[in-house]
Amino acid sequence: MVSAPLALIAELTHRCPLHCVYCSNPLAMQSAASELSTAQWTRVFEQAGRAGSLHVHLTGGEPLARSDLVELTARARSAGLYVNLITSGIGLSEKRLTALTEAGLEHVQLSFQGVREELADEIAGARSHRHKLALSRLIRQFKLAFTMNMVVHRQNLDQLSAILAMAEELAPDRLEIANVQYYGWALRNRDALMPTRQQIEQSQATVRAAQERLAGRMRIDYVAPDYYGRYPKACMGGWGRRLMLIDPAGQALPCHAAAVIPGLTFDNVREHSLEWIWQQSPAFQAFRGEAWMPQPCRSCDRRSEDFGGCRCQAWLLTGDARATDPVCSLSPEHSLVAKIVAHANDDRVSKKFEPVSLPTAWVYRPNPH
Amino acid sequence: MTPETTSRPRLSAGCRWAEANGAERVLLFPEGAIRFEGTGREILERCDGQRTVEQIIEELQQKYSAGDPARIEEDVRNFLGQLQQKRIIDF
């Protein structure tokens, strides 16, 4: 076990000007009033830096919603952390970007919801696409690493070629084509987001061709939906192995979804040191090692590669957080996932969610009080 | 893509070294980090935007004078090419 998380995910707030239908924030969001103060976040960053963490991801909600973001960036940098900003870009002006860069920001990951403005804004639940385009050009003028994060799903995968063309023109260093993962709000909207098998296969071929064509100019990473995989993802690199997330109220979690798992008490940075939470707290110990694994995981050759998949997904789909992640073809409950995939590929269902037949009955993510 | 001999490789925007820690040194980049040691570290540390590829090769050949110079040149070029693919250095 590593003595400190390699990266800290600082979920600064759950406030956000967007309402993305795929948002992975928990359904039960933290209120604005409960947010950690500047001083409290500073202590967290300092502890992380001293313990040997290398990265901090400033995220949310929308981290730009924090009026102290420039100061938080400076504190994180002086604590010895590499500062990544994970943002929708809403609230970012040239002036603010200059201040953030001077404070030590090194990498901006900007989310995109599509290539067609109308659909992108529908997915985001707010007019935002045009601003992101302008922002991309602005970011390129700064000495920052720039990643474009394009969230893909059933409603926009058919536009992947146009998406790639747009990315090529905006020229980020890296493009992440991220298939939606089903937690939080994405799970509520899963029927409208789950791609067809044909969409997945087509997108993989399109991405491969673009990776070759753009090799050395833009790095393209593709994240496939794990419902379509044979084996599960090594979620977060394993429970409590590489990453620690601190939510807006200071609750320390192994990932953004773990608070849904009952029977676990997650400790708070207001009351405990980061080091104790990471190394000793019961919640972080809960799924480390192999003793907790049921069969087939416990004797599976892949157990040290994927750790049995995602605990949160196991809980959400099977009701048992210890169970093999049912996306795994070896899971005794794999039929749960097979059924969902079959439904997504049912010809009768496909027509119902054609992008042209707006509006879709989306469940939008609200703002916390 | 392997570099031109006259180009001056440098760390890409958003890539920098963390604090040195003995024999190994960690390079930080967006959402990741790689430990470098030995010759890999020596090559990457010379990607300072001042030295040309040719100079980097020569320095390594001098330092490892017992090695095969042609082999060293090939290794350095390949290594630089890989770093560029990962967008860690620019030429």
Image: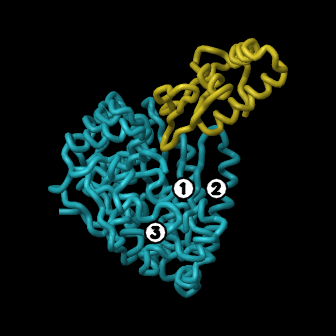
Chain colours: A cyan, B yellow
| Foreground disc of the pair 2, 3 | 3
The mark nearer the N terminus, 2 or 1, is 1
**Dot 2: chain letter:** A
Residue in view at x 65 percent, y 61 percent: A204
Q: Which amino acid does label 3 sit on?
A: Arg
**Image quarter in which the C terminus of chain A is found:** bottom left
Judging depth in this view, the residue of B33 and A86 nearest the camera is: B33
**Dot 3: chain letter:** A
SS at badge 2: helix
Q: From the viewer's perspective, is residue A67 above or below residue A291?
A: above
SS at badge 1: strand
The mark nearer the N terminus, 3 or 1, is 1
How many numbered marks does the figure carry? 3
Q: Which amino acid does label 1 sit on?
A: Ile
10 Å neighbourhood of mark 3: few (<14), some, or many (≥20)?
many
10 Å neighbourhood of mark 2: few (<14), some, or many (≥20)?
some
* Res. A72 image quadrant: top left
Residue in view at x 64 percent, y 70 percent: A300
Q: Position of residue A181 (x, y in %)?
A: 47, 66
From mark 2 to mark 3, how far is it between C-alphas?
29 Å
From mark 3 to mark 1, how far is it between C-alphas?
24 Å
Judging depth in this view, the residue of A246 and A363 nearest the camera is: A246
Left or right: residue A160 compared with residue A254: right
Residue at which label 2 appears: A207
Res. A359 visible in picture: no
Residue at which label 1 appears: A177
Left or right: residue A244 compared with residue A46: right
- Residue A311 marker: 3
Residue in view at x 48 percent, y 53 percent: A241
* Res. B36 image quadrant: top right
Residue in view at x 59 percent, y 36 percent: B87
Q: Position of residue A277 (x, y in %)?
A: 33, 53
